[in-house]
Amino acid sequence: MKYKFEIICLLLIVGLFALTQIVGNQFYFFIGFVILQYMVMAIAWNVLGGYGGYVNFGSAGFLATGAYTAVALINFLDVGLVEQMIAGGIIAGLLGLATGYLTLRLRGVYFAIATLALAIILETIVAHWDYVGGAAGTSILPKRKPELLGELIVDRKEGIFGNYKEFLFFLMGTVAIICVWISRYIENSKLGRGLNAIKDSEEAAECMGVPTMRLKLIATAISGGMMGVAGAPLASYLTFIDPLSAFNLEYAINAIAMPMIGGTVSWAGPVIGALLLGTAQQVSSLWIQSELNLLIVGVVLVVFVIIAPEGIIGWFRKSRKGSAR
């Protein structure tokens, strides 16, 4: 069937909606949102870092760009969450394009340091921007009864969703599924093949006529846009946002660790890594301090680098080739 994957994606979205109508415990939607947000971040990072080989340490900066775009829109126009996510994706995508134009001539550790510096610069700007709360942060109260196209979305009696957490979970799940589709499409497209050629040898790719700079800029814009979309609901989810929470180092580390654990060679790698590592972090946070989550990430990442340096997908492919022989 030609559109088998697309049908599966639509069925998954329907399944997400069904979960919001069946499951009564809001805690599951609370942690489910975080796992799905990590999944989008991991997929976004993999577009440039996995396919193209350019390691981005500034993921938190793009996520925070989406978050603070949403805050600015709430303060200025009081727009809905869907519009906030669209705007956050556009602004973060443009930031990715501009950043790529300035930094993609660098390679290896120099590019990684440049992206980390970008996140630090953005955090400094936000900390001194009083309109969005500055260093002290700002409280965000989402609309109690948001509407979309005239339909009441969240209301216990008349809305599509009975609780705002259900709406956030469904929205982030839908975004995650769309990002999975985009990532799979990129992997099988000329863009994906060009990025793989750049990853193997950028000089050889240029000699063969691959428009390396253009492909890298496209990948950076797509990656940044996805991260911006993931970050836009953050303020509504937390109901309070400050530079410390928006530019949290945890986002940057998880965005790298999850694709590496799952495998950067395929669209499925970041999904698997996010589900495994994200779930482990959320479950473990019930018994240990949240600060120790980074320790868990570090230990798991070291173990996988030693045992399966190409991630779960790479290990699975190697084992299949070995058994075939």
Image (cartoon, grey):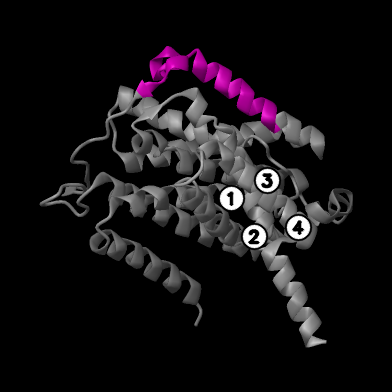
Numbered tag placed on residue 196 in the rendering: 4
Q: Assess whether mark 3 and mark 2 are in contact (beta carbons under 8 angstroms).
A: no
Nearest to the eye among marks 4 and 1: give it. 1
What residue sits right under mark 1 in the picture?
42
Q: Classify 95 as above or below 30.
A: above
Q: Which residues are magenta?
A: 115-138
Residue at left offset 44%, top offset 67%: 9
- What type is the residue that disc 4 sits on? Asn
Residue at left offset 22%, top offset 41%: 146
Q: Please check the rendered image and state whether residue 75 is part of the magenta-colored stretch, yes or no.
A: no
In which quadrant will I find the C terminus?
A: bottom right
SS of the residue at dot 3? Answer: helix
Visible in this render: residue 268?
A: yes
* Mark 4 nearby-residue class (10 Å; few <14, some 14–19, many ≥20): many
Magenta portion: prevailing SS class: helix
Nearest to the eye among marks 1 and 2: give it. 2
Task: State which tag comes first along the sequence, 3 or 4.
Answer: 4
What residue sits right under mark 2 in the picture?
262
SS of the residue at dot 4? Answer: helix
